[in-house]
Image (cartoon, rainbow, N blue to C red):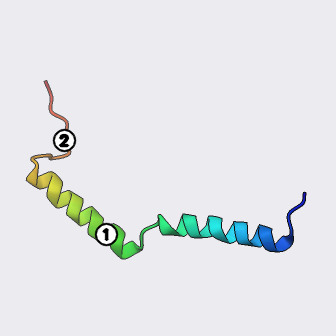
Amino acid sequence: MGKTLKEEVKRMSKRKEMQTKSTLSTTQEVLYQREFKRADKAGGYTGERKKI
């Protein structure tokens, strides 16, 4: 193996940091949903498919 326990723990903690940086808090998720909903509405998107 060649890796010490200390190096392995350091590698694992870095991986954990990378995962947590990309996640949003619940509050941020709600705010983004509202913002995108408003932007869609302003852009004329209704969410319904148009029948041809």
> Is 8 displayed left or right of 46 in the figure?
right
In the depicted structure, whether residue 18 falls above or below residue 40: below
Which residue is at 31% across, 69% downward? 30
Where does residue 49 sit, x and y in percent of width and height?
Answer: 19, 36
Q: Residues within 10 Å of mark 2 (few under 14, many from 20)?
A: few
Callout 1: SS: helix
Q: Amino acid at mark 1?
A: Val
Q: Residue at x 58, y 70 (%)?
A: 17
Mark closer to the chain start, 2 or 1: 1
Q: Which residue is mark 2?
A: 48
- Where in the figure is residue 44, as x and y percent of width and height? 9, 47
Please, is residue 30 above or below residue 46 in the view?
below
What residue type is disc 2 on? Glu
Q: Which residue is mark 1?
A: 30
Name the element at disc 2: loop
C-alpha distance separating marks 2 and 1: 22 Å
Q: Is residue 16 left or right of residue 32?
A: right
Quarter the N terminus occupies: bottom right
